[in-house]
Amino acid sequence: MATTTFPVLSAEEAADLVEHGSMLGLSGFTAAGAPKAVPIALAARAKRLHAQGKPFGVRVISGASAGACDDALADAGAVLWRAPFQSSKPLRDGINAGTTEYLDMHLSDVPQRIEFGFLGPIDLAVIEATEVTPDGRVYLTTGTGISPTLLRHARRVIIEINSAQSPRLAEMHDIARIEPPPQRGEIPISHPMDRIGVPYAAVDPRKIVGVVRTNEPDASVAFAPSDDASRNIAKHVVEFLLNERAAGRIPQDFLPLQAGVGNVSNAVMAAVGAHPDIPHISMYTEVLQDAQIDMLESGRLRGASTCALALSSTAMRRVFDRMDFFAPRIILRPQELSNNPGIVRRLGVITMNTVLEMDIFGNANSTHVCGTQMVNGIGGSGDFTRNAYLSILMAPSIAKGGKISAVVPMVSHVDNNEHSVQVLVTEQGLADLRGLDPKRRAERIINQCAHPDYRPYLLNYLERCKPGHLRHDLLRCFDLHRNLMEKGRMLEGVGG
C-alpha cells in the first residue's frame, strides 16, 4: 500500500489538529466503517482541556450513528451539535438535557445539504479506509455513508488505515456521484445489483494532512434472541406477503425488500428466508444484518444493495473468510444512492421498519418518547416508507410489561404520517390500511394491532369523539401519555 506518501500520525497528533467549534465529519454508517482511533483520542483531549478549565467541543456529522465515536465524545462533553442520526445513550442524554444540539434528518438528504453548504463548512473529515493512493483514491471499509461527500468538501482530511478490515471490501463498493441540480440526470439503476460507479472514493491528495494506522474491527452488533412478539410479527408479515403474491399484487418472482435495523427486523428477515413459499429475493436496503448473511449463504437471497455491513463479529468473519462468494453478491453504495427515493420507487421496494408508537389513524412515531425525549432518530425509515411500493411499519403492541401501549389515540410526535403508511403490524395482528377512510382505518388498527388490554379504551375513545373526517378529542387524545408521565403507566390496572 502506498500510504507512506502522506505523513503518518499518531491518533493523538491527529486529534490535536481539531479546533474547538469546528465541524468534524466521520466516515461510516452505524459502527460499520466508523473511525476507531482519532475520535477516541479527541475525546481524551477534550477531557484534559475541560480539566484545565478550557472549553472544547466539536460539531459532528456522519452518515448515520457512529458507534463508539459517539459514546466517547459525548462522555467527554465534547459534542456541541450532532446530525443526522445517533444511537448512543450518553449522546441521547445530552440531546434531551439540551446540552447538545441535534438535527434529526432523512439520511438521503444529508449529502445534498453538505454539497450546498446548508450545514456549514466541513473543517476536518476522518475517514476509515483499507488504502489511500498518492493520487487520492480512498478505498473504504464496511460502511460507505457520506464518506465520498466528506472527501469532496472537507477542508482537511485524515485517513485511518485499518488493517483489521479486508482490502477486498473494495470489490463490494460502487461509488458514484449524483450531480447537483439542474445537471442531475437519471440514475441508471433498474435492478438492485446494477453497478454504476467505481470501487473507491476520490479526494484531492493535497487535503490529506496525515494517515493514522489502526488494527481494530468494527464494534460487534449484538442481537437478542427472537422473542414471542418478534416471531409473531414476522409470522404476520410473511403471511401478508404470501397473500399479496397469491393475489397478483406482488409479482411471482417478488420485489426487492428493505428492512430496518434491530431485532424485530432481523427476526422478520429470518422468517422470510426460512419460508419455502417465498422465492429467492433481492434487497435494496441501507443496512445488512446477520439474517441477510444467512440468506445469502443459503441462496435465499440472490444479492443485496446496501450502505453498510452492520454485522456481529461472527458474521463479519464469515464474510471476510468467503469474499469470493460474498463480494459479487453485496454492493455497498453511498447513502444518497442506497436511500434514494427515486430508486426506491422505481424498483418497487417493499419496506419494513420499526416504530415506537402508532396512532389509530396510521401516523407513526419512530423517534420521541412522549413527544419530547429523543431516542435515536428517523434514520432512513422515512426515505423508504414515503416511497415504497408497500410500506410496512412494525412494533410490539406493548412495552414495559404492558405499562405502555404502542397503539394510542394520537402519536405524540409524527415521523411517518398516514399518507405514507400502508400496513401496520404488531404481534397481535396486521392492519392493511390501503383504501380505507380514517374511521375504517381506526377500527382496523385497534382491532388488529392493539393489545387486548387497551382495545376497550381505544374503541371507547373513537366512539365518543364527535364526527369529522378525523375523529379526535383534543382534550383527551394524550390522556395515555399524561398517565404515563404522571403515574408510570398508561392505564390503571394494566401492566406489571
Image (cartoon, rainbow, N blue to C red):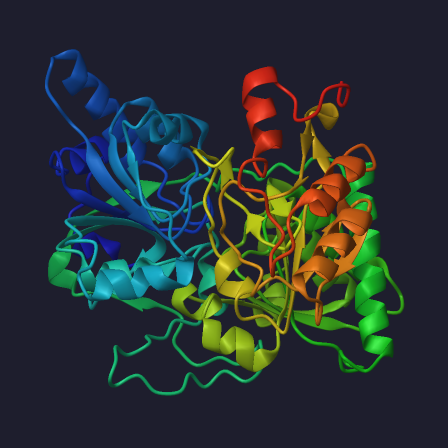
Quadrant of residue 176 in the image? bottom left
- Residue 346 vertical position relative to residue 467 in the rendered view, above or below: below
Residue 362 in percent (x, y) is at: 63, 55
* Residue at 65%, 51% in the rendered image: 318
Residue 183 in percent (x, y) is at: 25, 86
Residue 386 in percent (x, y) is at: 52, 66
> How many marks can you see?
0
Front residue (pair 99, 397): 397
Residue 374 in percent (x, y) is at: 44, 36
Q: Is residue 144 visible?
A: no
Front residue (pair 14, 60): 60
Quadrant of residue 280 in the image? bottom right
Quadrant of residue 402 in the image? top right
- Residue 144 vertical position relative to residue 175 in the rendered view, above or below: above
Q: Is residue 207 visible?
A: yes
Front residue (pair 253, 416): 416
* Residue at 79%, 39% in the rendered image: 455
Quadrant (top left, top right, bottom left, bottom right) of the C terminus: top right
* Residue at 17%, 12% in the rendered image: 51
View extreme (front): residue: 466
- Residue 195 vertical position relative to residue 224 in the rendered view, above or below: below
Query: Is residue 350 toward the left or the right of residue 153 in the image?
Result: right
Quadrant (top left, top right, bottom left, bottom right) of the N terminus: bottom left
